[in-house]
Image: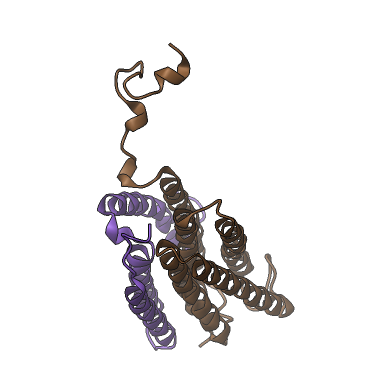
Chain colours: A brown, B purple
Amino acid sequence: MSQAEMTLPGHSPAGHSAAMEKPAFSIPAKKMAMWLFIIADTATFAGCLVAYGFLRNATPDWPRPFESITNVAVMTLILVTSSLTMLFGIDAAKMGDKAKALRWTFITAAFGALFALLHVREWLELIGQGMTLFKNPWGTGLFGASFFSITGLHLLHVTGGVIALVAVGLRYQGGRYNADDLEITGLYWHFVDLVWMFVVPLVYLLNLKH
Amino acid sequence: MAEGHVSNVKKYVVVYVVILAIAALQFVIAYSNISPSQMFARMLFLALVEGTLGLLFFMHLSENRGLLWFVVIFNVFVLLAMQYGWTDSFRLINGVPWAK
């Protein structure tokens, strides 16, 4: 009996039809893979934020330098709206409207790119005020280290997400990917948005200058 | 694919508006005159509400209870396990470098 025959239903050496096993949680394997990645990445961000909490709590001279919340508010609006536009795109893809799905996917990517640009602009402003990874003019150098590492990790995820959205969008357009693939990429994008919902209050709003 | 799918656009817009409203509330709380621990608790609570809405409706976990429990239980366990450092964090405030 050949290896190929042994893997067919009813021909497995273990006596059960391994090829016909029900997928975990009744979702395709590629979606499960994305969920497992999201769970792992949640632990990564949680580790960073919890460690930031430990440091902030234990450091008496923790600075509170943020004067204006306008930029953060605009960035939050852009990212949450991009999640909505992603949902519009997936909805259109599932309805079979390929052109509409593509349009919304690329709008989502554009919002992501705008978010990244605003974030870099904010970084440049803070660096211009003297803030680095190791020191700043307001207090402990740990502030810069934690701020840049948490927001930098998030910015990296946003950038990767924008690239993924464009790549998957183009392949969806070419017929290589389908609505399911778009939805799986959307899951990652929503995750990036969810992380931002925790970063804003814990890193920005709790460090507002009163 | 098109035959079985019902559009949920209205639901998404409602959830989006609610999430934005919660975010706005966080910005208001940031300027209120309350203690840091109170502010932290309120911010974290609101962030959890936002995150839950995003998980349930944007990421469609409300449609798959088994997967929802898998994600929640695993993440809660990992988050709780990470909290071991608070004793050290509070000990450092008092300036005690090493355990006696």
Q: Residue furthest left?
A: B65
- With B42 as the anchor, is A143 left or right in this view? right
User: What residue sits 42% from the left and 51% below the top?
Assistant: A35
Is A161 placed above or below A32 here? below
**Based on the displayed image, in which of its 4 quarters is residue A24 positioned?**
top left
Observer-nearest residue: B26 or A65? Answer: B26
- With B85 as the anchor, is B10 left or right in this view? left
**Based on the displayed image, in which of its 4 quarters is residue A143 positioned?**
bottom right
User: What residue sits 53% from the left and 52% below the top?
Assistant: A177
Is B44 placed above or below A11 here? below
Residue A82 lies, in percent from the top left, at 50, 73
Observer-nearest residue: B15 or A56? Answer: B15
- With B3 as the anchor, is A205 left or right in this view? right
Residue B92 lies, in percent from the top left, at 48, 60
**Based on the displayed image, in which of its 4 quarters is residue B22 positioned?**
bottom left
- Inspect this view and state whether residue A54 appears: no
